[in-house]
Amino acid sequence: MLINGVSADLISATDRSLHYGDGVFETVAVRDGRLELWSAHIRRLQRGCERLGFSAPDPELLAGEALRLAHSRERGVLKIIVSRGSGGRGYRPPKNPSPTRLLSLHPWPEWPDERCSQGIQARICAIPLGRNPWLAGIKHLNRLEQVLARGEWSDQDIAEGVMLDTEGWLIEGTMSNLFMVRDGILLTPDLSHCGVAGIMRGVVMDVARQQDVRCVTGHFTVRDLAAADEVFLTNSIIGIWPVCRIDAEEYSSPGEITRLLQRNIDKIKTNFLT
């Protein structure tokens, strides 16, 4: 673990990430010492810091620190946290913050291969996502909604939960983005009011366009989900997980378009930082 470039495992007790979740984070897949989709992760981190009103660390500085940790690692997960830094008591942010950088490398999750090849079971979560356009899209450190939603089930056969917002619109999974296919059209929820604009979500939408698959972003309900021909979930670590069942609804898994996208995302994931 590196904290501001130094090998350490403690941060200041006054860091605003601890007190207020005042910061952003990224989760990056590591393959053979290289960082998948690095430039996209850095762009989102920079947007997040800008939205929160403080300067992001220098990209070259972050890249150097990330490669120090990822060096010689065959597979792993790199987590990058950037907070506003330390400050006094109270919500008012410091006038001239000194952001904290925390980078840590973790083992690759040992998920069954069948999750990619045969699909997963999921459920609809009761905990809703609050709507806040200012925070929508960015990966900020406030994740209590996801923590509470993930605590709703303990059944190991259920791999993910699907979350709605307070208006009843489908948004995303607790750790993933949601896609549906109906009549050959790829559908994914609008994230202008809440949710995280995932890096793999963007990759999938780019690949869909390249493969002449129409992709529609909009407002969808649980009824739309039930009517889908295919459903899959995405993030930078899992890639694409087809969904075979959500509560009582069953789906073709993996469906034709899901398989098409799975075959082609690896061509874009080779956007490494070497």
Image (cartoon, rainbow, N blue to C red):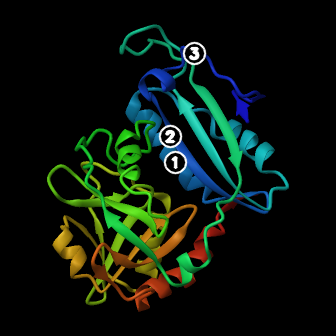
Residue shown at 55% from the left, 83% from the top = 117
Above or below, 251 relative to 15: below
Bin the neighbour count of mark 2 within 10 Å (Cα to Cα): few under 14, some 14-19, many 20 and up.
many
Q: CA distance from mark 2 to mark 1?
A: 5 Å
Residues at discs 2 and 1 in contact (Cβ within 8 Å): yes
Left or right, 130 with respect to 263, comes to left
Checking the image for residue 13, the label placed there is 3
Q: Secondary structure at mark 1?
A: helix
Residue shown at 37% from the left, 61% from the top = 161
Residue shown at 50% from the left, 24% from the top = 18
Residue placed most toward the observer, 179 or 252: 252
Mark 2 — residue?
A: 46
Q: Return the residue found at the far left.
A: 167
Q: Report the quarter where the C terminus lies.
A: bottom right
Mark 1 — residue?
A: 43
Bin the neighbour count of mark 1 within 10 Å (Cα to Cα): few under 14, some 14-19, many 20 and up.
few
Q: Quadrant of residue 233?
A: bottom left
Residue shown at 63% from the left, 40% from the top = 59
Q: Secondary structure at mark 3?
A: loop
Q: Return the residue found at the far top.
A: 88
Closest to the camera, between mark 3 and mark 2, is 3
Q: Secondary structure at mark 2?
A: helix
Residue 112, position as x, y percentages in the image: 61, 73
Q: Quadrant of residue 153?
A: bottom left
Amino acid under disc 2: Gln
Q: CA distance from mark 3 to mark 1?
A: 29 Å
Left or right, 126 with respect to 49, comes to left
Amino acid under disc 1: Arg
Bin the neighbour count of mark 3 within 10 Å (Cα to Cα): few under 14, some 14-19, many 20 and up.
few
